[in-house]
Every structure is written in structure tokens, then in C-alpha cells.
Amino acid sequence: MRNRVLPAAVAAAALLLTGCSGAGPGSGSADEERPGPGPAGASTTGPPSAAVPSTAAPSDSAPPAGAERRADGAQLLYRAGGGRSAQNPAFAPDGRSVLLTEFSGGYNQGDAALGVLPLDGGAPRTVLADPDRAAVNLPGASWNAAADAFAFATDRESGHDEIWLMRPGGAPERVTGHADGSGYSEPSFSPDGEWIVFQQSREPEHAAVPGGAAEQQDSLWKVRRGGGAPVLLVDGRGTGTDNRQPNWSPTGDRIVFQRRSAGREDWSLWTVDPDGGGLRRVTGAPGEHTDPSWSPDGRYLVFSSTLGDLPNAQVFVLEAAGGTPVRVTRDDGAYDGAPSWSPDGRWIAFESAPGGEAGPAALWRIPAPVR
């Protein structure tokens, strides 16, 4: 999902892979301007309702009879009606269902409710819907088995987003509370369920570093699942960088996110240690490489990219340690993004908006190229 608060800039370029390292928390390394050596190019190949555990079939079962398919092999999971946009699929730990965000007014527009979609067919079950409010989950590691809960952001009790969690069959539980007017969003769990990493967003007029242009400079933080003082991991304002959509690896040792420097429009993928150290760039050359999350074994990243000067972003996979990106989806007439890998490694779910992000998105899944 492209950022809801402020749209990401679109730039098309080739992709290089590198393994640059940085200093401590939020290091603004010059390596972002100097990609290291590596292979270029891509392979051609009212009140909330209660959450109810899904009883659907496992994700490796046959798709519902008559499910719509694309030429690239993707299968339709869910298309909303009435101009609503289905986005941000995140698999349940048992792989039987996906958590999703449904926007009422189109792509990233209007109220937003959370739903749980069974993968044997049928409509999603709404688990949280507040009038005139937006509850939004992040693709990837937002639903955690150890915590028996999913994390999301909502402005349901304030004028800005906070981090919340919800257990199946339970009520929303607030994790963070702050009063500086910034928004806390895009949360994902550590694999042990003890921590939640998230993005802090500020409006551009309040985000600029001294002497810099007024542009968004988001930071990354983590907080205990039970609340408490957040811990800064990547300082956007202090380094003149914009850092978004953090996803914790299933091995627990890295967090992947997207980043751009002040005055630039391209996005790169980076990883950071859970203590804020070991900042390392994954993708190199200019371009828009966003929405990263992990394979269930932590060996691969799945993300959205315009690699190869594509007219619309598509889903790609690359090794987390470096390698050549492999294109997964192939519908140049649609934007494909916000991908998540199924727990059994067989599928990648994603959102797709025909004609680009101007129209409502639907949810699809496609066989993973590796597992």
C-alpha cells in the first residue's frame, strides 16, 4: 500500500543490490547516494464487531470454484463493490485467512474498516469499523501467533493515529498514546510477539530539518506489546530521511523498511537491527521499491517495484542477502503492491488496482516463485 498520509513519489529506474552498512540508530549514511556493486536488472521470468477465528481451508487448498484468474496465474481472492477498495492482505498465522483493510471511498480514500477474509471463499467478516475513522493494517507481519493478535493503526480515540492490537474474538486494545500530533502507523510484530515496530509520521511543514525543504521525514520506533515508552530505531528528522512500512523478519534479527533521502523521489529498501544498529541498504539504484515484507523462512523479501521502467508497479522477490530480483506478477495495466507471503510458503497475496492507483483495488494471490 502506498502511504496513506502523504503519497509516495513515483520514479522508474533499474535496481542494484548491495550490502552497505551504517552506524547506530537512524544513521544517515552517504551510502544511500552511492549504491555498491551488484547485479542490475530484473529476471524476465459505530461499535466494533468481534473478530472470529476463521474456519476456512488451508492456503494450499484449491481455490474456490470459478475463481477469476489473470493471464499471469493470479487468482482473485476478493473484490469489494460500491467503489470500496480492498487492500493490505496479511495472512493469519495458520494460513487459513487474511486480514485486510477496506477503504470506503476508493484507493486509500475515506473511512477504513478491518476485515478477515476466509480463503475458501466468501466475503470478509468485518472485525472493526468506526464511522468517520480509519483502521489500517500493514501487510506482512501484522498478525502474530505468539501474541494471538493482529496490530493496526487507527484514530478512533484521537485526532491522530495510534497503535492498537486486537485478539480474535476480542475488543481493540490501545498500545500507544502520545500528544504531539504526529501519527503512529504501519505496525508489525516481532516473531515472539513481545514488540511492535511502527512508523511515526509528521506533516511536511513540521518535518523539515533546519535549512531543509519542507517534506515528510518519518521515523521508525518499537514499543512493547503491553505499552510503555517507545524506543527510537531510525531517526528521520535527525538524518533528513523518510522511513516507512517496517516489517519484522520471522527470524527476529532484522527489520526491513523503505527509505528515501531529503530532496530525492526514489525509494530504496533497507534493513536495520532490532536495536537500531546495523543499518544496511538492500536495493541500490534510483527507483520506487516499496511495501517490503519477508518470506516465512526469512530468506527472501517480497516487495512492489517499477523495476525495468514499468508503467505500473508490480510484485518482485529477491534474496534478503542479495541477488537478482524476480518479477512475480505480470499485469502492466494494473498496479500490484502490498504483498504478503503465506505461512506455508506457497502463495503471495497482494492488492491490485486496474489502471493504477486511481481506482479501487482488489485482493489476489499468486504462486510464490520460491519456497
Image: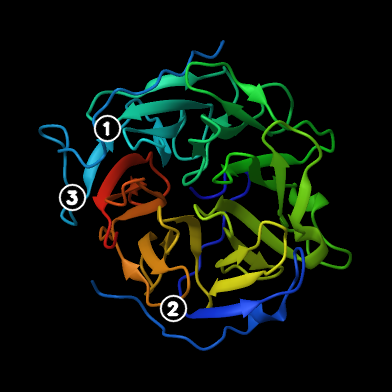
Q: Depth-wise, is mark 3 or mark 1 nearer the camera?
A: 1
- Residue 37: x and y in percent read 51, 89
**Residue ID at (41%, 37%):** 93
Residue carrying label 3: 70
The reply to whether the C-beta atoms of the residues labelled 3 and 2 are less than 8 Å apart is no
Crowding near the residue tagged with mark 2, few <14, some 14–19, many ≥20 C-alpha atoms within 10 Å: some
Amino acid residing under circle 3: Arg
Q: Report if residue 312 is visible in the image.
A: no
Label 2 secondary element? loop
Amino acid residing under circle 2: Ala
- Residue 147: x and y in percent read 56, 32
367 or 237: which is nearer to us?
367
Label 1 secondary element? loop
Q: Which mark is residue 14?
A: 2
Vertically, is 34 above or below 105? below
Q: Which mark is residue 54?
A: none
Q: Which mark is residue 119?
A: 1
The reply to whether the C-beta atoms of the residues labelled 2 and 1 are less than 8 Å apart is no
Q: N-terminal of the two: label 3 or label 2?
A: 2
Of all residues shown, which one is farthest toward the right?
210
> How many dots with numbers?
3
Could you give the CA–CA distance between mark 2 and mark 1, rounded to whole angstroms? Answer: 35 Å
Could you give the CA–CA distance between mark 3 and mark 1, rounded to whole angstroms? Answer: 18 Å
Q: Quadrant of the C terminus?
A: bottom left
Q: Report if residue 264 is visible in the image.
A: yes
Could you give the CA–CA distance between mark 3 and mark 2, rounded to whole angstroms? Answer: 26 Å
Q: N-terminal of the two: label 2 or label 1?
A: 2
**Colouring scheme, one of rainbow, by chain, secondary structure, one colour:** rainbow
Of all residues shown, which one is farthest toward the left?
66
Amino acid residing under circle 1: Leu
